Amino acid sequence: MGGVLFSFTGRIGRAAFLLSSGGLFLLLLIYQYLTGGWVLNYLGWAIWGYVQGALLVKRLHDVNRSGFWALAVGAALVIGGIVFSFIGDTEGTPSALRLVGFSVPMACATGFTLGLLAFVGSKPGSSRDNRFGEPPEYLAEY
């Protein structure tokens, strides 16, 4: 199970990806509810992001796509955060420019993420060996 959750190599099928991602998100929600303080919350989000990234990369490998597509989501989120940090006033009330500067990259990241998840969640994996390895043995037909 550790190889499925923490490794960025190999392939996983649709059912394994969807079940793992859903279970991981529920664990994150429970963790957020039970812990307090920003350090523990950010730690939970960091672990979730790493494991979810590993799952997404392996699912992209299963549909014969490069795992670097997963970096586009992270890049859009980072760009949105940088723009949000540097544009606008420092009085605590966001300016219109700051809201637009944050909203546009975040909307793009959200749309790209949802589209990518719909793609990897619905497209069957390669039934034969591809450049990323053999098809997964478990749930191979899904």
Image (cartoon, rainbow, N blue to C red):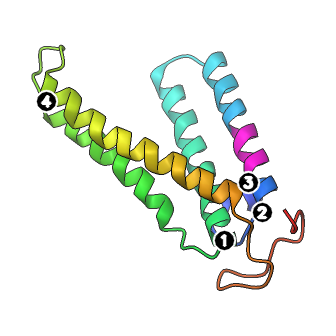
Instruction: State how far apart marks 1 and 2 are (Cα).
Output: 9 Å
- Residue range corresponding to the magenta coloring: 17-24
- The mark nearer the N terminus, 4 or 2, is 2
Determine whether 106 is above or below 112 in the image.
above
The residue that appears at 44% across and 60% down in the rendered structure is: 71
Q: Secondary structure at mark 3?
A: helix
Q: Is residue 3 left or right of 99 when viewed as pictured?
A: right
- The mark nearer the N terminus, 1 or 2, is 2
Instruction: State how far apart marks 3 and 2 are (Cα).
Output: 6 Å
Determine whether 99 is above or below 65 in the image.
above
Q: Quadrant of residue 138?
A: bottom right
The residue that appears at 52% across and 41% down in the rendered structure is: 46
Mark sitting on residue 132: none
For the residues bearing labels 3 and 2, Cβ distance under 8 angstroms: yes
Name the main secondary structure of what is drawn in magenta.
helix
Instruction: State how far apart marks 3 and 4 are (Cα).
Output: 38 Å
